[in-house]
Amino acid sequence: MAGKKIAGRGVVMVAVFIATFMTSVEVTIVTTALPSIISSLHGLAAQSWIMSAYLLTMAITTPIYGKLADSWGRQKIFQWGVVVFTLGSLFSGLAPNMGLLIAARALQGIGAGAVMPLTFTIIADYYDFQERAKVLAFNNTAWALSALVGPMIGGFLVDNLSWHWVFFVNVPLGILVFILIQVAYRNDNFTPEKLKMDTMGIVWLSAALISLLLGVEFLASSLPLSFGLFVVTLVTLYLFIRTEKRVADPLISPKMFANRTFSIQIATTTILSGVLMGYEAYFPIWLQALYRVNATKAGLVVTSSSLMWLVASFFVGALISHFIPKKISLFALTILLISYFSLCFASLEFPIWLFYVIAMVNGACIGTVNNMNLILAQQLAPAEMMGSASSIVTLGRSLGQTVMNGVYGTILNIVINATRGSIPFAKINEVISSSSSSARPDPAMAQVILNGLHGIYISATVILVICWLYNMTDPLKEIVKE
């Protein structure tokens, strides 16, 4: 199918574009509405689960849907995901209390677990290797658009209607995507296979992901519990790997990881997605807490990164066709290492404009490498495992962001507590969360906050070094071609 002019392909790509926007805007638009949701449902104690429930169920179901798509076909699984996501959105908007809202968000995540990876798989089905990078770049505009307009849409809906509409807005979009795929999607070359479900593989992988994400969730509040959950993660992950090596039709085939270059793509996209959170979450905090920049200007740091990610994605195809992937990754990782190393020793007088430059560098480098990782993973995996390969990339991105966001938060708290001396932690928290109209914090308190931020970027630098060294072991020494 790839590389041919296919009737209805444009309509399918419109559906994919809308689906990408619908699922990616969910994060930014909901974040804007959180204060109103907490106030309305009186759920401050459980507010973190509004996002965690969505991420958890999405992470668990992503590899399962990838396997099902390879066996039963893209259309059925994609439409199922759209229906479940849309129902989850509807129930979230109707939720009368925090418990039911969290349950509805979990349902949304179950749907997103199918929609997000299969957008990549459908693109791979419809376009050949040479065209794929351009189409993925176009599809990335939906992600960039969601990052730019999500907070504005969320703010408008909350201010003029209510927080319920933050979820209701997805319902007509979901219905439209379902109809477009039903009318236009064709995959005449696909032959459904009889699938023997890898039940124990699903059980062990789900247990590993649940314990990992819960362990991250409890890092800041209970280190012993978190450590115990991480032990469970290691045990269940070992059992999962052992199961996959033994069963005839594994959930995630070890055959894919027999290719070292494929494994490096998955590891790299996971690590860089985690590094991404280092500036997306903490550059605005740095600017607002220490420089008293207002929220709008601080938010432009993330916006500038998103725009550069989008621009860079249009050059990925040309880069892959002219350079060995290993060289592209090592060059981008070296640039990232230089930028993060500078943050490890940045003083209180570090120029504000440099934050925007570093954010743009991050967007360009991570955007280039992450898109290359996806394209190569799809190309290097066996054709019958295209859906699984796409879902593994999506899972890696989700896990990288979720895990490192929790790790960064824990590092910030640990370093602040270790260096604050007699300064009350509550006072430091007050300074970080106070408005931009306040005066800059006194030098001693500012230094404590800066120490915590240094801890975050030192950890990011360390994992970038690990990623650089791992990419050095890539045995592929030629340009990848179809």
Image (spheres, helix red, strand yellow):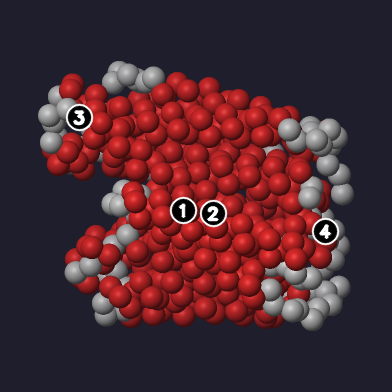
Q: Earlier in the sequence, mark 1 or mark 3?
A: 1
Residue 420, numbered circle: 3
> CB atoms at circles 1 and 3 under 8 Å apart?
no
Q: Earlier in the sequence, mark 1 or mark 4?
A: 1
Is 415 placed left or right of 278 in the picture?
A: left
Q: Could you classify mark 3 by the number of other residues whose Cα lies within 10 Å: few (under 14), some (14-19), or many (20 or more)?
A: some
Q: Residue at x 50, y 29 (%)?
A: 461
Q: Amino acid at mark 1?
A: Phe
Q: Amino acid at mark 4?
A: Pro
Report which residue position mark 1 lands on.
230
> CB atoms at circles 2 and 1 under 8 Å apart?
yes
Of badges 1 and 3, nearer the viewer stands: 1
Report which residue position mark 2 lands on.
234
Q: Amino acid at mark 3?
A: Arg
- Secondary structure of the residue carrying tag 2 is helix
Q: CA distance from mark 4 to mark 3?
A: 54 Å
Q: Residue 372: x and y, percent?
A: 69, 44
- Secondary structure of the residue carrying tag 4 is loop
> CB atoms at circles 4 and 2 under 8 Å apart?
no
Q: Earlier in the sequence, mark 2 or mark 3?
A: 2
Q: CA distance from mark 1 to mark 4?
A: 32 Å
Q: Amino acid at mark 2?
A: Leu
Q: CA distance from mark 1 to mark 3?
A: 29 Å
Closer to the camera in the image, 8 or 371: 371
Of badges 2 and 3, nearer the viewer stands: 2
Report which residue position mark 4 lands on.
382
Q: CA distance from mark 2 to mark 3?
A: 34 Å
